[in-house]
Image (tube, rainbow, N blue to C red):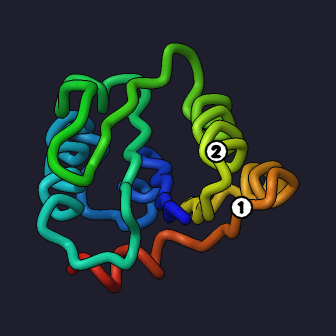
Amino acid sequence: MTTTLVVDGANVVGSRPDGWWRDRAGAARRLHERLLVADLPHDEVVLVLEGGAKGGVKAGRDGHVRVVHAPRDGDSEIERVTRAAREDGGQVTVVTADRFLQARVQGHGAMALGPSWLLDRIA
């Protein structure tokens, strides 16, 4: 069974007040770089980016990390990615602090965790 970690890039970056709002693209790039070298227990990591953050990392696969640029809002894309991974029979964990989004992905059979869970593991 494939395990997928779906990361709400905007939500994870926005969970720590480190000046990310001055450079959304740079913050997304730094998160991507940390995910690339992180020792996470998932077969695939999907980083979903939206808005200005999309300028920091090109869409596509880089090792075990796949970057997805949300065509509209990030939440809808996170839900789409989660649904697709679950339909393929995989186990999915979504990292977001958005309680409404957590409920939506849990409705698709995914587990939801907050940003601190991920940030503690990729520090």
* Mark 2 surroundings within 10 Å by alpha-carbon count, few (fewer than 14), some (14 through 19), many (20 or more): few
Q: Farthest residue in the bottom direction?
A: 120
Q: Secondary structure at mark 1?
A: loop
Which sits in the foreground, 1 or 105? 1
| Badge 2 amino acid | Asp
Image quadrant of residue 110?
bottom right
Answer with mark 1 or mark 2, whichever residue precedes in sequence: 2
- Identify the disc placed on residue 24: none
Vertical position of residue 52 compared to residue 44: above or below: above
Which sits in the foreground, 18 or 54? 54
Q: Farthest residue in the front direction?
A: 1
Image quadrant of residue 96?
bottom right
**Mark in front: 1 vs 2:** 2
Vertical position of residue 23 compared to residue 52: above or below: below
Left or right relative to 74: residue 29? left
Vertical position of residue 34 compared to residue 71: above or below: below
Q: Position of residue 68 (x, y in %)?
A: 39, 31
Q: Position of residue 43 (x, y in %)?
A: 37, 63
**Residue indicated by mark 1:** 110
For the N terminus, the quadrant is: bottom right
Residue at 73% x, 50% y: name it: 101
**Residue indicated by mark 2:** 88
Q: Position of residue 92 (x, y in %)?
A: 60, 61
Residue at 21% x, 80% y: name it: 123
Separation (CA) of disc 1 from disc 2 = 13 Å
Vertical position of residue 33 compared to residue 52: above or below: below
